Amino acid sequence: MEQGIVAFLLTFVTLFTSELNAQFSQIRSEIPAALLDCYRYPELLQREHLLPMTTNVLIALIRKIERYQGTNLDARTTSLGLIHKFRIDGIERQPNVEHTEHIIPYATKRPEFFKQKLLLEKFLPSRYDVLLDSLSLVERCSLHWMMSNSVDPWERGDESFTCSRIQTGEYREGGRFKRSPKPIPGDPAVQQGWDPLASRDRDPLGSRDQQYSRDSSFSRDPLSRDQQYSRDSQYQRDYEGALNREPSWDAGFRQQQPQQQPQDPQVFQRDPSYTGSSFGSRVNQGNYEIPYNQAGLSTCPTENGVLFSKYGAYKAGMVIAGIAAGLQPQNVTLGNVLSSREPFGGRGTSSLYQQQRPGSVYRSQQQYGLSIDNRWAATVAGEVALMVLLKTPTGLPSMRVGLSGGWNDTCVPKWYFLREPYHETITDTQVRGSVDGIVLAYKMNDITRIDNTIKLSQILDMYYSEQGVFDSLINAGNRAQLFASLAPPSYVQDQSFNFALSLNPELPSSVSFADNNIISTATQTVASSFSGYLANLSPRSQQQGYRTGPQTESVVDLYLVLDFMWEFLEARRILTYLVDQFDISPQSSRFFLVNGRDGNIVINATYSCLDFHLNFTENAYRAQPTGYDQLRVLMELRQHFKWRMDVDRISNQGGGPPRVVLFMPHVTSVTYDKDRDDLWSITEDFRRNLPDVHFITTGAKDGSGLSLYDDYKDVFTLYLADLRGSVEPIVNRINQMPKRIINPLCGANWYAQSWSVPRNTYFNYIGTNSIQYFRLHPNYFFNSEVFRIKVQGFGYGMINVCHSRTNERPSANSTYLQDITCRQINTDSYIIEIGEPCVDFDYAIQCPPLFISVASGRPTIQQAFRCNEDNCRNPAQIKFSISSEGLTCHSGAASMKIHPHSVIFATLASLLVFFSKSKLV
């Protein structure tokens, strides 16, 4: 027995030691096997098949990893695991090598890889790992491209079409700008046609005349197996094995399972009408209009690892590396770095024992005591040092900090292009990413002191928002001022120089430096230019980082009723932008997609933007019935919302987000003459019996919406040429919708067992320097003699509570303070008591609602950041509750209040009529 236990322990120790040795081994100069599928399948190299490159999508992916099977990973574990597992810098496409079943034309050969290799081995070693099973294949590859820094400098063949349209509202996916591509003489790709998964046929557009014909744009399935490849192919079997689960609009959402991970070959379907595919389907997978042996430098190369944000595009991998370094800061001596390096054939020297080598830059023993801060090495100093080493041989004038770029589409950002050919320049995205990384690295000590279990997703969520990381000044919009306060310019220069000395031996041989003064001079020049360029980079967006008053914090259940007559790419642009504007998560908003023809909910209660992006595919879209029948949709929605009222009764939920229905008919004007009477009846039913449902629509302001919406507030015109500009007012209107306070015991039949129901509690959370608005509809107090609303604080922070019967947005900062009452609370409560609330009104619809606001101030050092419950979006949120007492249930259908005197008068009137008729008889 004892021998068995000893044997078991020896085996465990051996395996554990082997695992540690494997994890701390040197980084191999190749694409890891875990990410090889992202390059093996050409479809995964096309960004239209991956997730949008946005901050919200990155945060959603990280949340999914953090909470996979209840793991709840902290920021240290997640950040180190991500940069070791998903970030592979310096991967370069080989433009003259054909992508085949057995040859992948990508390799880790650019200088960025050797810098990252040094960082991971010497400055950010880690035994932490993240589970790949937590993400689907599409999600893994999307995260890899979000994290990995590289530039594809080679010509693609689409530059005449692409380069003039980046970063403007004029360019979009889906064929707004058409062109007629001319076949290249002798190009076998044109002669043979295209087979999406074949290894030799290189034209991804198939018949090019058909590709650019809108009439036949969806006439074939590019991934139809009988057209793609032989079923005897091992490649096909591997591809089907990786993507063999069929998605279902219903299966993914009607069961309301947020963790479901659909993996679908349809996700990779190329849209044949995508005229932007001249770069969208060809970038990073070969030059289909450029012969293999004639590829030159692109005039607008693609830059990878870039994410979209309102504060400017940035490198996500650098930000997360900075956070990881800040969570385990260390100073590494130059001697420690060089002593462990084997001769690599680098620039001038590669190890400590070469210090006496003639011509070596490492001739001073004192240099080996130079200290390198891993926080700077992973961010700003690393970028400065790399450019110095690459550009110094060509002269100081060639060193340039700052190279701007732009997106293929700011509504669905998937490709980021530089505006000029790339010559080892520090780009704008590298400036922003490295600065954000070092700022957060320096703040991590304070952040973990406040909450040592904080998650990486929470840090990113706060930093890339106006709320900031426990301080509204610590956000991406204020990066220039934050960077200037970190360290003096001389320290930045010293760190860049020290890291350059450690990085130089790692780079492939090209030249040798005979004197380190050359590196020192170049480092000072570039570091000074870096700071100066940052101060002038996007000053308008930086000013957005600071706000004086509280920001409206919106949470919504958004029902989007879509006419599936919209072109798929147009609908995807609109919906993607809308989804990105709201925090779709279990702690915040939810999104529902409703068919405008039959009223069926095709995407039900998404709890993550990933659910939408992974399931809103072209095949699923085209399977839906087209057309627009508003009457039928309203009838279906009426039943749905009544069911939700009954759910509120069961759960005793005393409030919730506003329920907003956004109609998107395909035509700009809809005629309602045929169903006008029925529409009028059902809209009145919504107003009286479902008063917490709000309606807005796109279309013309012609009054055709009857009483369903206000023409001036709730009707909006969409302009596809300026989609962001025309959707923004819709988002602002939705953000104005107040949260619901209800009597949950009423249910859909508006009946409770007693006029006065017990107290029910509705828990809420609000971010710092924010304000939330609530409304209690008169249907819940029309027959009440007196009711009370209690707002309770829990000591998470000071909040200001205001209420009014006439002002829809009461606030202590309002210029019109009449009928507004306010009070500050922290651990105490504020009770709003209203007696005879509708005494002067005969109809419930005439009685004014009760409006309440809850506002938080700027965080202070004394504030306890302790919001660590599951419903907390981040630790800085303030918890409070709203409870009610004395509420009643009054259906708007009853319309008129019944007083005892009214009953007497009505009885007397009936008797008079009866006797009058009797006399006549």
Image: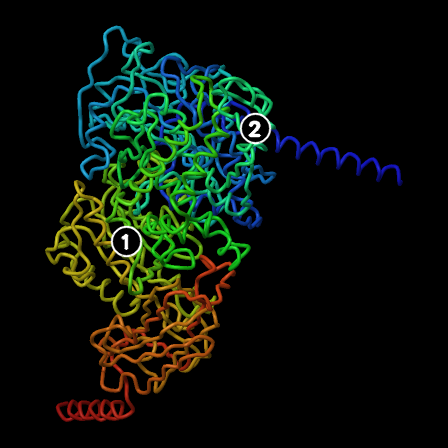
Along the line of sight, which residue is nearer the eye, 663 or 682? 663
| Residue furthest out toward the top | 186
759, above or below 679, in the image = below
Q: Residues within 10 Å of mark 1 (few under 14, many from 20)?
A: some
Q: Amino acid at mark 1?
A: Gln
Quadrant hosting residue 908:
bottom left
- Name the quadrant containing residue 177: top left
Q: Position of residue 307 (x, y in %)?
A: 36, 39
Quadrant position of the C terminus in the picture: bottom left
Mark 1 or 2: the one toward you: 2
User: Compared with residue 603, is residue 271 higher up or lower down, i.e. above or below?
Assistant: above
Q: Residues within 10 Å of mark 2 (few under 14, many from 20)?
A: many
Residue at 32%, 83% in the rendered image:
783
Judge whether 820 appears above or below 861 on screen.
below
**Left of 526 or right of it: where is 363?**
right
> What whole-number distance in Å separates the C-alpha atoms at marks 1 and 2?
44 Å
Secondary element under disc 2, as helix, strand or loop, is: helix
What residue is drawn where x is 26% and y is 17%? Answer: 207
Tell me, for residue 544, which label it has, or none: 1
**Which residue position holds label 2?**
338
Q: Residue at x 57, y 24 (%)?
A: 351
Mark sitting on residue 847: none
